[in-house]
Image (cartoon, rainbow, N blue to C red):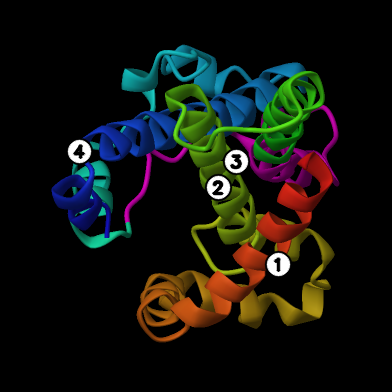
C-alpha cells in the first residue's frame, strides 16, 4: 500500500502520487480525445478534454488508492451514437486509455535509455530517475489492469465489440456483477495481476538498460 511507502520514504511516496496522477490524467484525457476525434463532444462538454488532473480525479477513489492500494478516477463519458465509426468507435475510445499509457512508457523509456547511453550508468537514487521509473511502473499497471475484460474497465468495452448478438446475456451478467467480480479479482487474484505486471515491467527495463 502507498501509505506504507509514506512511512518508509515520504519523498518516494510523493513521487508515486505524482506519477499516479499523471498516469490517470493521460489515460482519461486520451479517452476524451478519442471520442472527440470521432465526433462525440460529450467529454469535452463536461470538461474532460483537459490535461488538468483535477478534471479527472475522483477524490474518494484517489483516497482509497493511497490508503488501500485500490482506487479509480472519474470515468470519461462518451455517447456511442455520436461516434463516426459506429461498429468500432467504442472500441477505439476504450483502447485509447491503455494505449496512451503504453506510449507514455515508451516515451519515458527512451529518455532513460538516452541518459543511460550518455552516462554509461543510471543512479536509481536520483530523484528524476526514481520519478521516471515510478511513471513506467504506474503506466504499465494502468494499461494491464484496464485491459481486464470486466466492467467498468476498458477491457469490457473491447470484449463487447467482439461478442456476438446471441451472447448478449453474457454482457448483461457482466454489467450486473462486474463490480463484484472486479473486487474479487483485486483481493483474491492480486498475485496473478502482479505476475502480468512484472512480466511487462522486466521486458521494459531490459530494453532500456
What is the spatial separation of the Cα atoms under label 3 and label 1, in whole angstroms? 13 Å
Q: Which residues are magenta?
A: 71-99
Q: Nearer the viewer, residue 194 or 90?
A: 194
From the image, tell me which residue sits under label 1: 199
The residue positioned 28% from the left and 51% from the top of the image is 65
* Disc 2 versus disc 4: nearer the observer: 4
Quadrant of the snapshot with the C terminus: top right
Q: Quadrant of residue 17?
A: top left
Whether pointer 2 and pointer 1 mark residues with C-beta atoms closer than 8 Å, the reply is no
Compare marks 1 and 4 and give the one earlier in the sequence. 4
Q: Quadrant of residue 110?
A: top right
From the image, tell me which residue sits under label 4: 10
From the image, tell me which residue sits under label 3: 136
Residue 172: tell me if it is visible. no
Whether pointer 3 and pointer 2 mark residues with C-beta atoms closer than 8 Å, the reply is yes
The residue positioned 37% from the left and 38% from the top of the image is 16
Residue 137, numbered label = 2
Residue 178 position in % (x across, y down): 46, 73
Tell me the SS state at disc 1. Answer: helix
What is the spatial separation of the Cα atoms under label 3 and label 2, in whole angstroms? 4 Å
Residue 190 position in % (x across, y down): 45, 77
Measured along the vertical axis of the image, is residue 195 above or below residue 120?
Answer: below
* Disc 4 versus disc 3: nearer the observer: 4
Amino acid at each position: 500500500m502507498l501509505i506504507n511507502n509514506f512511512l518508509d520514504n515520504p519523498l518516494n511516496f510523493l513521487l508515486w502520487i505524482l506519477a499516479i496522477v499523471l498516469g490517470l490524467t493521460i489515460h482519461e484525457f486520451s479517452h476524451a480525445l478519442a471520442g472527440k476525434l470521432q465526433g462525440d463532444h460529450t467529454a469535452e462538454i463536461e470538461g474532460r478534454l483537459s490535461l488538468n488532473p483535477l478534471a479527472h480525479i475522483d477524490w474518494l477513489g484517489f483516497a482509497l488508492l493511497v490508503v488501500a492500494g485500490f482506487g479509480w478516477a472519474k470515468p470519461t463519458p462518451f455517447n456511442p451514437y455520436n461516434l463516426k465509426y459506429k461498429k468500432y468507435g467504442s472500441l477505439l475510445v476504450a483502447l485509447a486509455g491503455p494505449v496512451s499509457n503504453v506510449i507514455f512508457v515508451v516515451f519515458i523509456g527512451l529518455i532513460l535509455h538516452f541518459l543511460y547511453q550518455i552516462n554509461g550508468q543510471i543512479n536509481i537514487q536520483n530523484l528524476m530517475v526514481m520519478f521516471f521509473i515510478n511513471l513506467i511502473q504506474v503506466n504499465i499497471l494502468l494499461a494491464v489492469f484496464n485491459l481486464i475484460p470486466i466492467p467498468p474497465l476498458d477491457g469490457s468495452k473491447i470484449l463487447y465489440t467482439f461478442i456476438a448478438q446471441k451472447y448478449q446475456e453474457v454482457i448483461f451478467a457482466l454489467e450486473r456483477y462486474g463490480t463484484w467480480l472486479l473486487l474479487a479479482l483485486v483481493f483474491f487474484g492480486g498475485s496473478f495481476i502482479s505476475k502480468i505486471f512484472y512480466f511487462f515491467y522486466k521486458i521494459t527495463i531490459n530494453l532500456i538498460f
